[in-house]
Amino acid sequence: MRLNLKKLFTLAAIFTICGCVTSSLVSCSKGDDEHIDHSTPLRSIITGMDYGDGVFVVGHKSPDCDAVCSAITYADLLQRLGINAQARVAGKLICEPLYVIQEAGISAPPILEDATGLNMIMTDHSEYAQAVNGMAKARVLHVIDHHGTGTVTTAHPLFYYALPIGSTCTIIASMYEELGENPTPTQARLMLSGLLSDTDNLKSTTTTDTDRKYYSWLLDRSDITDVESYYAAMNKARTSFDGMTDEDILLSDYKEYEIEGVKLGIGSVLASEKLGIEELCRRMRGVMPAVREQRGLDMLFMMLGDRDAGLTHVPFCGEGAEVVAEYAFKSAATEDGCIVTSYIPSRKANFVPAITEGIAYWKNKPDETMKIQFQP
Ligand SMILES: [Mn+2]
């Protein structure tokens, strides 16, 4: 029942937004009829909700650029609508998001440790497993996301806005435009950074025409003059690993999931000139068992990419993880617990669906004789 309620409100929100688009088209075609309200209903829907003393806007744990920049710019947008919205982050900023914030000349939002009892808006996630502690006991008012529906459920009406596009920052940019709010150069820079990061500079398979449209829209409004060199510097920051322990590296781009009752974590790291794929894999394997234990996970996987070599290494740990990984990526594991496969571009679009199939297979408890023998 709770799920149905949530879906109902999701549909209501999506239909409402479709309605915004159609009603603005209709009002355009009718010219300057004084009796038609030309302002978008989106504004009154958002301002019509009860935010109490105020609301915090936060992205997921292990904050990446899209999570951080969507939270900051969405809080800014809500403030323009007269709502007391404050951005927060779900953990310490390192590498790429830290670089983006420093380059923008702003300070990072404070870390929110616990959301219990607070009015909350979640950007770039809808999974409690990826959220700030206490989110299940918070009053979640909006979810702005570009992933599948996660585990968040509410008993009260919810503004749930999800689109199947490349970044949450693209969605936020579209809301600025829909609401007739022009972002400042800094806000445009931040949204563009989230878009660049999540779509790998429009090269990832998750990139859509909408992302390409808002890439230009944001670039025109930002203070970035050379976007190619800016993105190269972001990438360098992503793989710098300066002053980071192996555990920091594992958790630098990391998400947790619960799939068919299996609690699992997936970290994603790109190899670099400084830290090659073999060395990276060796170091991650060394620290994975302790991280799995600490976080109470059944299984832990890493997606270690080497774009130049066209390879991804997938070290794994936890009971059943070998069967899951072999089935997911259709190849045999090495003796030291790793799958080597062709380059996997996206955790969301490629890795998670494959692991989900692997878990479904493993859940049917194949015995040794049934186990598929994959070629290494
Ligand atoms: Mn994202």
Image: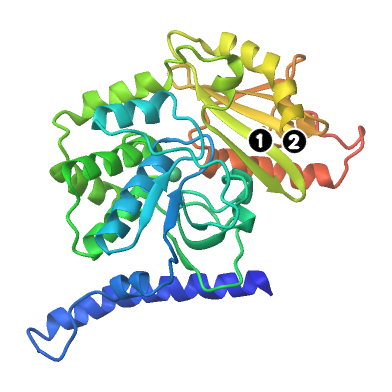
Where's residue 284, x and y in %?
Answer: 63, 17
Where's residue 370, x and y in %?
Answer: 89, 37
Q: Quadrant of residue 41?
A: bottom left
Compute the Cα span from label 1 to label 2: 7 Å
Q: Residue at x 43, y 38 (%)?
A: 110
Quadrant the C terminus occupies: top right
Q: Earlier in the sequence, mark 1 or mark 2?
A: 1
Q: Is there CB contact under 8 Å for labels 1 and 2?
A: yes
Q: Residue at x 61, y 45 (%)?
A: 133
- Placement of 94 over or under 365, stated as above or below: above
Which amino acid type is shown beneath numbered disc 1?
Gly
Residue farthest toward the bottom in the current orientation of the protein: 35
In this orientation, does residue 77 appear? yes
* Disc 2: which residue: 297
In this orientation, does residue 205 appear? no
* Disc 1: which residue: 265
